[in-house]
Image: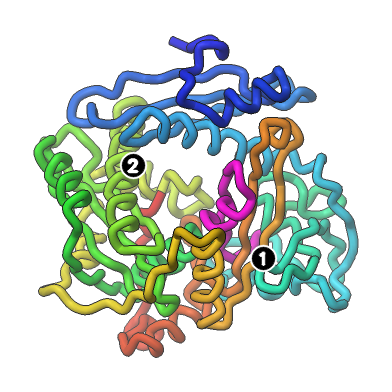
Amino acid sequence: MAQPLQDIPLSYSCLHLALHKSHRFGPLTRYSFHRVPGNYGMLHAVTASVRDISQQKEIVAAGGGLTKNRAFFAAIGEALERLSLRQHQYLGLTAGRYTGKDGELDPNLLLQGIDQLTFPLVRWHEEMEILWHHGSELASGKLCLIPAFSLFPNAAAHTPDGKLLYANTSTGTATSRERNAAILSGIYEVIERDAFVVHWENRWAGIKKPLDSKSIALLRQIESRGFDVSIVALSTDTGVPVALAAIADKTGYQAAISFGAAARATWEEASFRALEEALLTSFWISTRLYVDGTSYKEAQDRMTLLPEPSDHAYLYGFPQATEKCRFLFEAPKEDDVRFANPPDKSVSNAELEWALERLGSVRAICIYADITHPSAAALGLYVIRVVIPGFLPLTRGNVRSILNPRLVTIADALGRAHGKDFGFNPDPHPFP
């Protein structure tokens, strides 16, 4: 049952502060806490609805977590991100061709590596007039223009005549009360996806690494509810700890296998978050399997088109697909994985500077754009889109990044084999 807005618990200090200052809740129209049944009872689930004042249709998003606060903010953040990504008309986009002038981000950097033979895509070309959005390079603070097709994947904001173009660069989106916190979350999302795609396409196993007491306690709690749990570290040339967790069903009534991943400043933070994400994914996919009624063959057929990202995780909810991803956890023993020394978090912005330094160590540039919808800004929130050209994105269906040189350069840097020699993974990835 939806709760009236005035009954939001006082612990949600961000929204209460916003209400006190502005006497409104901006785009938030309703939210609901949901009972999570059965083996997922340790989770909290929330749905939230937002609506722009000029739109009649609401945007609904779901969020979850091990605490009510986390679930609530996850749902609100996801809803505001969707609103900001779709309501691009507020952002002052400019139209023009790429001229190569200083400050224009080369669209070619956002299109690397697509194996275009697998799917007919509308591709950018140099004579095409496109829309641009203002952004900044994080390291230098230099202003730049970013092709809108890399920022707004599902909105008609790519060309003046409404064409939708396909970008092939990894992006991260986050909502926070602080701009730098949102940028940092976006960077971690990009690094996490990049590391996973490298392992998936090259068919690498992750590396087993000891867990701290907090993650062990969560793992055992999940196992006690009818799951097998696996967790490994993913290798990356950035030195940022990345954890990958998988939760496999033992009861026959839940999603067969589901994944969660996280990049953080420490292995302890990354592993705990990955376990939470894997459990959440298992819950959402189990719910969808119960409601949807789609067969495994129908789920497979979606992969030949341009599926929604969630369709990838849905496919692996079927037991027929589980063997395709077992290799990720087949490391025979614990091995060393090189993590960079963590930052001193007691120092303001030290973690963001550390993350930027890790990207600089592999000659990657980080660009961000503030895409905050005005009604989200009225709540004192920031919605930030991070773009790191050249890093591997989570692709959809048969549109893959196997021509991206990063699949090979990371392997060479880490001394591991790559798919260019023995063939890349032909199966669709299982990541949500």
Circle number at residue 367: 1
Q: Is residue 297 left or right of residue 405?
A: left
The secondary element bearing badge 2 is classed as helix
Identity of the residue drawn at 67% across and 74% down: 109
Question: In which image quadrant can residue 201 be found?
Answer: bottom left
Residue 248 spot, x, y in % from top left? 18, 47
The secondary element bearing badge 1 is classed as strand
Which amino acid lies under the numbered mark 1 shown in the image of this protein?
Ile
Identity of the residue drawn at 56% across and 31% down: 14
- Say which of 30 and 153 sits in front: 30
Identity of the residue drawn at 51% across and 54% down: 185
Answer whether residue 171 is magenta in the image.
Answer: yes
Disc 2 designates what residue?
281
Q: How many marks?
A: 2
- Say which of 138 and 419 sits in front: 138
- Say which of 343 and 96 sits in front: 343
Asked if residue 220 is positioned above or below residue 411 in the image, the reply reads above
Q: Is residue 217 left or right of residue 26?
A: left
Answer whether residue 368 is magenta in the image.
Answer: no
Residue 108 spot, x, y in % from top left? 70, 75
How packed mark 1 is, by other alpha carbons closer than 10 Å (few <14, some 14-19, many 20 or more), is many
How packed mark 2 is, by other alpha carbons closer than 10 Å (few <14, some 14-19, many 20 or more), is many
Boundaries of the magenta span:
165-186
| Residues at circles 1 and 2 in contact by the CB criterion of under 8 Å | no
Q: Quadrant of the N terminus?
A: top left
Identity of the residue drawn at 68% across and 40% down: 84
Circle number at residue 252: none
Color scheme of the displayed model: rainbow
Which amino acid lies under the numbered mark 2 shown in the image of this protein?
Thr
